[in-house]
Image (tube, rainbow, N blue to C red):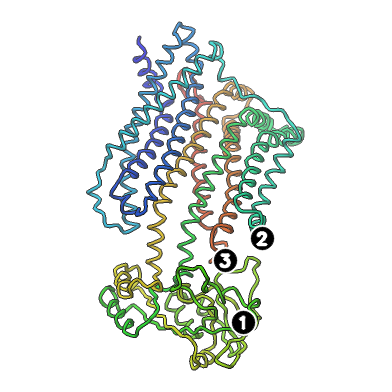
Amino acid sequence: MNILTISLKNIRKNLSFYALYLFSAAFVITVFFSFLSFSMNDIIVEKISSDGRVESMCRTISIFLMAFVIFYMTYSNRFFLRRRSEELGIYALLGYRRNSILALLCCENVFLCAGALLLGLFFGSCLHRGIVLAVTALLDLYIDPSGIPFFAPRAAVYTAGFLLVIILLLSVSNASLLLRTPLIGLVRSRKKAEKKMKFRRLPAAAGLAMTGAGYLLSLDIIRGEDSIWITSGFYLTGMITLFLLVCGTVLFIFAFLPFLLDKDRQNADRFYTPDRIILIPGFIYRIRSGARTLIMLTLLSAAALTVSSVMALSLYYPVAALSRITPSEIEFRVTEKDEISEARALVMRYSSDPGAASFLETDIYTVSSGSPEALLPPEYSLGTAQENSKSGETLRDPGFECISLSSHRALLLAQGRKKAAEQLPTLKDDECILIRYEPDRDSSSEAGRTYSLQLDSEEIPVTVKETSMDNSVSFANSVGTLIVSDDLFQKISGSDLPCRSILSINGNGVKDNERLYSALDQLLDGSPYLQGHSHRQRELLSVNSSTFLLIGFLVVLFFIASGSILYFNNLTAVSDSKSDYRILWKMGYSRKRIRRIIRRQVLVFFAIPFLFGLVDCMFASLVYKNALMQNLLGNSPLLYLPVLLAVLLTGVIYLIYWLITVRACCRAVFTDSGTGRVEP
């Protein structure tokens, strides 16, 4: 019987054994091929990239994708080679030469990879078409989907060539293993564990201390300007924190976890129970013998959780901040009275429901203060002229920009912020509300402070009754906004102070109307004071969608790699201990109790990477949010909602992998390897 026939029969008779390898490889190829199809789609790339940024990112991410695919396929191949080591040893005992065994493995890899390639090309084409449709709908691109072919031949050729390189690498890896492994080593390789680690108190304590120090450094970011991250430099502190956490994780898993479990084993009351007497020694052995794999999975899970959480936060935060950056659907500074009537005419022309649109004209007066500059809030001079500035037309003079309480309330109601309008306090003539640009890091408030407003030759003191972040005018048109009583505003309007008028247009009739915004932009000659909530939201999605989509490919591969490696690792460990479970069966352990032991054994190896990754993700998100994102929305817990959703999604993925792994492990234990019959 020749090698080709043997390989075909092996695959046909052990299809359930090869199914996971086939479908997981097909899944990876699906992601890889859809990414190549997207990056080589000139029509869609030209639409979403005007400066070459997308093309550059595609080239960078393709390197990471290729590295992940090679790593994943190599690990999967090693797993199946180890599972078949006894079979290969028998082939050697029967007289097969090593080159014949290697040829057998190569043939099987070719058949399996060919099947995975066919599945990957089909599902990858479907995924690519879905991505194109989603991007087209999300960004409202004018693209005819029928002009984009379902199948990308050039991407298929690249994928097939890359898969051929992987097969060659796997063949070299298999040849290296067969050449350096003696005959008896093949037969007994499944019983061979990694080098055992000894219990050492010092590395255990060092791992705990380094991990704690890394988390404390991360927490220090909340101190703001006094933080080590600011005083010593962000990137230096970040590298030190990363070093501490990685080294701490390595030492924690290598030394502290076995030490902790060994201490638990010494507690006789807790140890001598039907389950724990089996579980704890198994935990200690597996953690000590498989520490390297567990460390790799922990770091992989931490990377996947962190990247997905940061990506979700980066997408959500700018969109949520639009409620402050551009609170009105359309807003612009009126420089000529005709612009108001022309804007109304454009709304009548382009709006599907002109009657639902509201027009509010707001006067804003810039009032300087006689208070010492050191005592004034930062909003007073935020965005004022600087010597080397090149954008003088958008800069403002220092001062409070005053609007009346009634105008502020009317704008809030027009913007649909009824609750904020109802919570506005009444103001006396010597009281005001200060609109904060962003909250102070030390949570301080300007409430109770008194500032003097200079009206011609008169100084009027006003006391800040409260501070608020509910601005009703965009930051492009008003920063340092002071809400004053209607009577005081009337007095201000009677003085000779700089004034500008802002027209705010809101309502369903103008919402998400890009044609209307473009017409107004032409009317105002591209004025920087024209702001639109829906327009900015569309702009943000357009600019960032390609970035998040490309990073999303990496996140998916992170999850595939970590979940599949956990599956392979646990299935190997349980299969190697099959005789131990048989002994438990003969000792009187019920099928239900053995299943529970397997579930708990598998759970701990899913829980350790996930929990470590979860904690790392929380601290990384805290650093990212406080150090690299402008704090326009305060510290509301709702800001971490996207992080929570990313963690929950990751938890669901891990739960699915855990259920699949438990089922496979139970089948491996309760299935007779000779007959394939599931035992009672």
Give the residue number, with chain letter if any, for mark 3. 634
Under circle 2, the secondary element is helix
How packed mark 1 is, by other alpha carbons closer than 10 Å (few <14, some 14-19, many 20 or more), is some
Compare residues 325 and 425 and report the one nearer the observer.
325
Image height of 548 relative to 269, above or below? below
How packed mark 2 is, by other alpha carbons closer than 10 Å (few <14, some 14-19, many 20 or more), is some
Residue 223: mark: 2
Left of 152 or right of it: where is 97? right
Residue at left 25%, top 47%? 148
Q: Amino acid at mark 3?
A: Gly
Residue 614: mark: none
Residue at left 37%, top 26%? 112
Q: Amino acid at mark 2?
A: Arg
| Proximity of marks 1 and 2: CB atoms separated by less than 8 Å | no
Residue 123 x/y as whole percent: 33, 39
Compare residues 28 and 171 and report the one nearer the observer.
171
- Comparing labels 1 and 2, the label whose residue is closer to the camera: 2
Compare residues 589 and 317 and report the one nearer the observer.
317
Can see residue 469? Answer: yes
Give the residue number, with chain letter if any, for mark 1. 465
Residue 160 x/y as whole percent: 33, 31
Q: Amino acid at mark 1?
A: Lys
| Proximity of marks 3 and 2: CB atoms separated by less than 8 Å | no
Total labels drawn: 3
Mark with earlier residue (3, 2): 2
Mark with earlier residue (1, 2): 2
Residue 425 x/y as whole percent: 57, 83
Can see residue 127? Answer: no
Residue at left 34%, top 48%? 131
Disc 1/disc 3 C-alpha distance (Å) = 20 Å
